[in-house]
Amino acid sequence: MSPTRRDVLKWGAGAGGLATAAVLGMPSAATAASWAYRSWMSSLSSSLPITSLTIPGTHNTCSITGGAVPKCQDWNLPTQLGNGIRFLDIRLNGLAGTANEMGLYHGPVYMYKRYQDVLSDCRTFLRGNPGEVIVMRIKNEHSGGNKLNAEEFKRRFNWHLDDPSMGFRSLFWTNPSWPTLGQARGKVVLLTDFTHDWSTLRWSGHCDIQDQYNVSDDAKRRAIVAHFDKAFYDHSTSKMFINFTSTAKGPIPNPAIGAEKILPSVYAYLDPRRNQRARFGIVPMDFPNYRTDILDLLINKNFI
């Protein structure tokens, strides 16, 4: 349904314009029932730039333990992938007691998962669903007693790609430009957020990011809506829009409480526009299982 005048006044003139503006390079129409969570990308045209899609993701993807402050997810990685998540926020420190390995961390808190386990999960999923694409941000968390300097982080990262015991390089799309779906099917698109001199897609240079997290709830809601509108009206496919719904405000942040407060507002924005063609880019969330109806709305944007 189209936004009413009340919707336009509530969400701003930019949002109201979604009803009539034309979008270039959007997926062709398909029935809403034509996709499944595990393989929703597979029926989309291979010629589509992945920057023209709307892609659900997770913030601090593997932060599933450690108490209320560091925990950002209930679903483990295979469950996330099986439920349509295609953007992973992977944050790494060195793994204590090892010379080459890295572990998943939220700040200094270890999540009891090694980086090679993440890559194995992704490879297993993509082998079973070769029409899918995963976008993976790799961040040097550089926190706590296991933090790594830039050179050591690069060395260990390459070890996971090239050491015979690992051999994950073929899993990745490492080119410095965003691929089409056809170019990247069955692969992990590498998005680097650490210091290096390689020719790859970079977090700071190839994305337009909203990640205001230490702000009031109302300020966060406004930031999310503004970035949705910005993504809609910018028809360029050279960059990826990334719109975090996650918050971590105050001296003792609680991501679960933040998700409970913010996700209903995300749904309130998307639901009146469920039948409008739009690309919103990547939308990383904490606890997407709290509102799987948002996952439905985001994925279905690619089939309108």
Image (cartoon, rainbow, N blue to C red):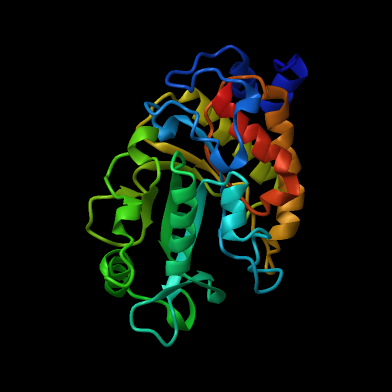
Rendered-image quadrant of the C terminus: top right
Q: Quadrant of residue 138?
A: bottom left
Reply above or below: 117 against 301: below
Give whichever of 114, 66 is nearer the camera: 114
Is residue 46 something one can see in this rendering?
A: yes
Measured as percent of width and height from the top left, residue 210 is found at 52, 44
Query: Does the image show residue 213?
Result: no
Q: Residue furthest top?
A: 20
Residue at 36% across, 40% down: 184
Q: Is residue 86 left or right of residue 4?
A: left
Residue drawn at 48 percent across, 28 percent down = 44
Q: Nearer the viewer, residue 8 or 131?
A: 131
User: Left or right: 242 with respect to 101?
Assistant: right
Q: Residue most toward the bottom?
A: 97
| Quarter occupied by the N terminus | top right
How many dots with numbers? Answer: 0
Q: Residue at x 70, y 73 (%)?
A: 67
**Point 45% across, 38% down: residue:** 131
Q: Where does the image place residue 53, in percent across and percent down from the top left?
A: 49, 32
Taking depth in this image into account, of 135 and 259 the one nearest to the observer is: 135
Q: Position of residue 291 (x, y in %)?
A: 73, 45
